[in-house]
Image: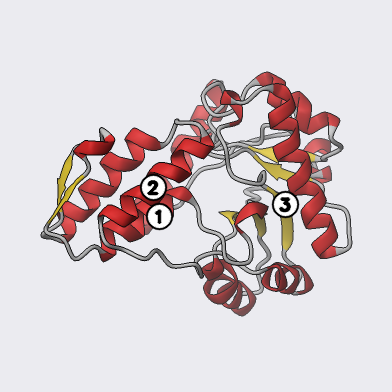
């Protein structure tokens, strides 16, 4: 971050990041990174460590595991969803996440737990990292950053609620690691939609060094270090990934 601010980063510098704190970050990603001599930053939603589960994963696992051919959620106002094929299950997941994503946190949790019961599914409790795994990641040389406690849409919270979510996640990780945590990632991360300018100021006031969004593009020395741009490398070929890199560079220059 110091090099970014000073404009001394080498040409084509990139940073690898992971959000949320899934167990596969430690079990799968860490060995791959180590094999290639790479470092990465992992942003952890602390409320799901040690056996917790994110609401969207309850939906995903419910659709994957349900033995029912049709998931009737009309009583919850969420429609009816066929589950006879992988394509139908994927469509059900997308539709349900879209309907539930921006509801208040407590409502999201309650309704997804009801959804699992109606689908006759016992959702797993081993999807997220343990505190021990987070500590092992840091000891392996990875960077650990905060990502709130329960991954809320910060723009939907009061300033006090947002400050509590952000501050408690920082404190929790500092207790686990025994060191200061200086980086933060906004949940979902779209500026103006998922987090507000007021949230940025809260992050700054809480003593973080920098924060990352999910605004596509690249960041340079003159950009706000509390709204660093990122993008997802989900392309299936090198050509498509290269094209995405060029689009992000162009988008940053235009903005």
Instruction: Give left or right: position of 114 versus 46.
Output: left
Please tell me whether mark 2 sits on a helix, a strand or a loop. helix
In space, the residues marked 2 and 1 are separated at their CA atoms by 6 Å
Residue 227 relative to residue 182: left or right? left
Residue 152 percent location from the top left of the image: 57, 37
Q: Earlier in the sequence, mark 3 or mark 1?
A: 1
What is the secondary structure assignment of the residue under circle 3?
strand
Q: Secondary structure at mark 1?
A: helix
Relative to 41, say whether 246 is above or below: above
Where is residue 180? Give x, y as percent: 88, 53
Classed neighbour count for the residue bearing mark 1: other residues with Cα under 10 Å, few (<14), some (14–19), many (≥20): many
Query: Is residue 235 visible to the viewer in this orientation of the structure?
Result: no
Badges 3 and 1: C-beta atoms under 8 Å apart?
no
Q: Do tag 2 and tag 1 residues touch (Cβ < 8 Å)?
A: yes
Local packing at callout 3 (Cα closer than 10 Å; few below 14, some 14-19, many 20+) is: many
Residue beneath label 2, please?
A: 112
Say which residue appears at 70% left-offset and 70% top-offset. 137
Pointer 3: what residue? 145
Query: Dividing the image into 4 quarters, which one contains the N terminus?
Result: top right
Q: Which mark is residue 58?
A: 1
């Amino acid at each position: 971050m110091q090099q970014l601010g000073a404009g001394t980063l080498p040409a084509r510098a990139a940073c690898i990041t992971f959000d949320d704190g899934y167990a596969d970050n430690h079990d799968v990603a860490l060995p791959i990174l180590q094999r290639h001599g790479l470092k990465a930053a992992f942003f952890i939603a602390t409320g799901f460590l040690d056996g917790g589960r994110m609401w969207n994963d309850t939906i995903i696992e419910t659709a994957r595991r349900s033995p029912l051919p049709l998931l009737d959620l009309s009583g919850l106002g969420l429609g009816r969803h066929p589950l006879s094929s992988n394509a139908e299950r994927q469509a059900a997941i997308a539709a349900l996440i879209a309907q539930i994503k921006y509801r208040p946190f407590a409502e999201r949790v309650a309704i997804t737990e009801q959804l699992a019961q109606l689908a006759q599914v016992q959702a797993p409790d081993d999807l997220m990292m343990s505190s021990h795994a987070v500590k092992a990641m840091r000891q392996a040389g990875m960077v650990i950053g905060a990502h709130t406690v329960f991954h809320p849409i910060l723009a939907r919270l009061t300033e006090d609620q947002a400050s509590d979510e952000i501050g408690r996640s920082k404190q929790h990780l500092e207790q686990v690691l025994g060191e200061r945590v200086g980086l933060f990632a906004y949940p979902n991360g779209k500026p103006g939609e998922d987090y507000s300018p007021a949230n940025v100021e809260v992050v700054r006031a809480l003593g973080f060094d920098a924060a990352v969004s999910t605004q596509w593009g690249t960041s340079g020395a003159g950009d706000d270090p509390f709204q660093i741009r990122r993008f997802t490398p989900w392309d299936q070929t090198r050509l498509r990934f290269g094209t995405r890199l060029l689009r992000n560079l162009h988008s940053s220059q235009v903005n």
